[in-house]
Image (spheres, rainbow, N blue to C red):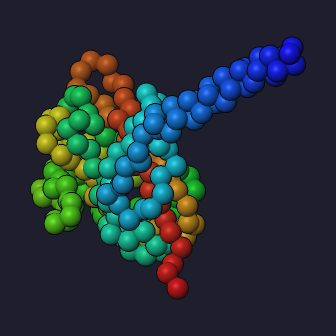
């Protein structure tokens, strides 16, 4: 008579452990957030969640294949910036081996595209644009501070680099004021794809 009771007592902790495991699996499956589609030709995004150290910015490219001429639209929406911009800096990885001509870079008021319309530069914002000798940064000095209202962006017309992969461009902005410090706005994660054969 003691044996069935013992077996019953051993079965209870096993059932409890199974229930805990099942409820943990359900909690994990319901707490994960759905992935959001990008407005770019890229199909994969390696950074899933924004953190205080990384903010994903919207961009659009006309062609993602390597060595193809492409128009880049690096977008800054009003929610991406909290102050006016006195100077905008874009850091570019050293392995992004594309020649960036400052004459083919513009600061614009942007029209953000969607299903029925294309992203485009609506109006050029007068600015002085400099590209570092090593191609590692683009420095943009607007003639007057750009307010934090309306969608703006950087337009570039370049040939994509040879190397396929992902490239993180970082946006830093300096606000008008006494302290000349640049603050991080976010990053554009650019993907270069192999040619279609």
In front: 130, or 25? 25
Relative placement, left or right, of 12 versus 52 is: right
Of all residues, the one furthest to the front in this rendering is 1
Q: Quadrant of residue 83?
A: top left
Q: Residue furthest bottom?
A: 197
Q: At x 48% / y 49%, what residue is drawn?
A: 168
Q: Residue 26 in the image: x percent, y percent?
A: 52, 35
Residue 150 visible in image: yes
Label tally: 0
Q: Nearer the viewer, residue 166 or 34?
A: 34
Relative image position of residue 16 (x, y in whole percent): 66, 22
Residue 84 position, x and y percent, is 20, 31
* The quarter of the displayed image where residue 61 is located: bottom left
Rendered view: 36 above or below 4: below
Residue that sits furthest to the top in the current view: 2
Kindly identify the residue that appears in the image at 20 percent across and 47 percent down.
Answer: 152
Identify whether 28 is placed above or below 118: above
Apparent side of residue 193 relative to residue 87 in the rendered image (left or right) = right
Observer able to see residue 54: no
Q: Position of residue 127 (x, y in %)?
A: 21, 48
166 and 116: which is toward the camera: 116
Q: Is residue 175 left or right of residue 147?
A: right
Q: Which quadrant is the N terminus positioned in?
A: top right
The residue located at (56%, 66%) in the rendering is: 164
């Amino acid at each position: 008579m003691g044996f069935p009771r013992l077996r019953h007592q051993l079965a209870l902790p096993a059932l409890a452990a199974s229930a805990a495991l099942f409820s943990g699996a359900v909690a994990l499956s319901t707490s994960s957030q759905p992935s959001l589609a990008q407005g770019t030709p890229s199909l994969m995004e390696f950074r899933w969640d924004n953190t205080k150290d990384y903010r994903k910015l919207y961009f659009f490219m006309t062609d993602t294949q390597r060595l193809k001429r492409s128009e880049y639209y690096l977008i800054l929406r009003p929610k991406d910036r909290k102050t006016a911009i006195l100077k905008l800096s874009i850091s570019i990885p050293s392995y992004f081996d594309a020649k960036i001509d400052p004459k083919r870079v513009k600061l614009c008021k942007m029209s953000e595209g969607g299903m029925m319309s294309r992203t485009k530069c609506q109006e050029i914002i007068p600015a002085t644009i400099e590209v570092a000798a090593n191609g590692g940064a683009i420095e943009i000095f607007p003639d007057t501070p750009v307010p934090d209202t309306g969608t703006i962006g950087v337009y570039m017309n370049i040939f994509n680099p040879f190397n396929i992969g992902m490239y993180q461009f970082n946006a830093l902005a300096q606000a008008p004021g006494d302290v000349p410090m640049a603050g991080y706005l976010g990053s554009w994660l650019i993907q270069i794809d192999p040619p279609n054969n």
